[in-house]
Amino acid sequence: MSLVVVGSVAYDGVETPYGRRERMLGGACTYVALAASYFTQVGVVGVVGDDFDPADRRLLEEHGIDLGGLEHAPGKTFYWSGVYSEDMNDRVTLRTELNVFADFRPELPAHYRSQPYLFLANIQPALQRRVQSQMSAPRLVGGDTMNYWIENRREELIETLAGWDVLLINDSEARLLSGERNLRRAAERIRAMGPKILVIKRGEYGALLFADDGAFAAPAYLLDSVRDPTGAGDCFAGGFFGYLAEQGVDPGAGPIEPRLLRRAVIYGSVMGSFCCEQFGVDRFRTLTRAEIDARFQEFKALTEF
Ligand code: AMP
């Protein structure tokens, strides 16, 4: 294993203009882990309830994901539901039920603690911090968060992300976190909070990378049909971070090459785009690394001039 991912493992209820699913496998950790599993060996940290379907467990195992850190607890699995606008650029959260996550106190298995890469996917900031404190000396720590935590646990979140190298958030969250409308100024403020590598995701408009060598902008892949954008941001994070882990980056030994960071943004966009093609995690049932690399090449053609 190389990359430890902590975050929600969930059941989601989702409605988009293409249809509705009452209950399907989701969760930030699930999406990050599945996307990253195409690049590196992943182990997850999370908790599920006694309603967790063995078939969902098998999907993760089939991707070579280590489930030694996935606890089973009495009660119900985290549940989230949301409904998308007609153009799918906005979504409204209908329900967030923490369930077994409310009392989750992760204890990492011994073989997780010495891993070089750590990704703190979306979940309570205090849980993210607890997991980070149990890692012996990760080379690169990245994370994600969302408006729910920025609004409800602001202080806890700011303390938590002070210890991260990488933060990935979407544009509205960047504005909310920084209190700045202008994205360049928002990025400056957020980088001053800790994470020196910042990715601001902009949905169908692509993503912006801010790092020591300046900014980089990438468009989103032009899909002909978006069925369900749930998890796209997490899959972006999984592609971005998984690629950096695959490359063995080590900021302790010198700055990460800007070219690698830029490629990571493109792999992130590629993974986010695949995620949107089908509901929930369905695209990952058939996706191959060859398809991923082919789409990476298409990105070159899309942006080269
Ligand atoms: P994304 O579309 O990338 O923002 O991620 C959607 C996933 O985030 C869904 O699968 C949800 O289960 C999960 N999620 C929604 N709200 C939360 C929350 N407050 N904490 C952790 N995970 C969440």
Image (cartoon, rainbow, N blue to C red):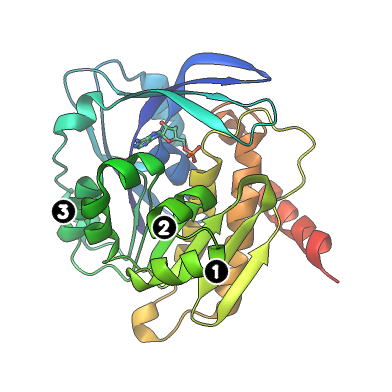
Q: Which residue is mark 2?
A: 179
Outermost residue on the bottom side: it is 254
Do tag 2 and tag 1 residues touch (Cβ < 8 Å)? no
Q: Who is closer to the viewer here, 53 or 174?
A: 174
Left or right, 152 with respect to 205, comes to left
Mark 3–mark 1 distance (CA, rounded to whole Å) = 41 Å
Q: Quadrant of residue 167?
A: bottom left
Mark nearer the viewer, 3 or 1:
1
- For marks 2 and 1, the one nearer the N-term is 2
> Alpha-carbon neighbours of circle 1 within 10 Å: few (<14), some, or many (≥20)?
few
Query: With respect to residue 144, does 188 lie above or below?
Result: below
The residue drawn where x is 71% and y is 57% is 219
Q: Quadrant of residue 10?
A: top left
Query: With respect to residue 170, does 135 lie above or below?
Result: below
Residue type at the position of mark 2: Gly
Residue type at the position of mark 3: Ala
Q: Is mark 1 within 8 Å of ligand 1?
A: no
Q: Who is closer to the viewer here, 147 or 304?
A: 147
- For marks 2 and 3, the one nearer the N-term is 3
Q: Which residue is mark 3?
A: 110
Q: Which residue is mark 1?
A: 184
Mark 2–mark 3 distance (CA, rounded to whole Å) = 40 Å
The residue drawn where x is 27% and y is 58% is 158
Residue type at the position of mark 1: Arg
Query: With respect to residue 66, does 293 lie above or below?
Result: below
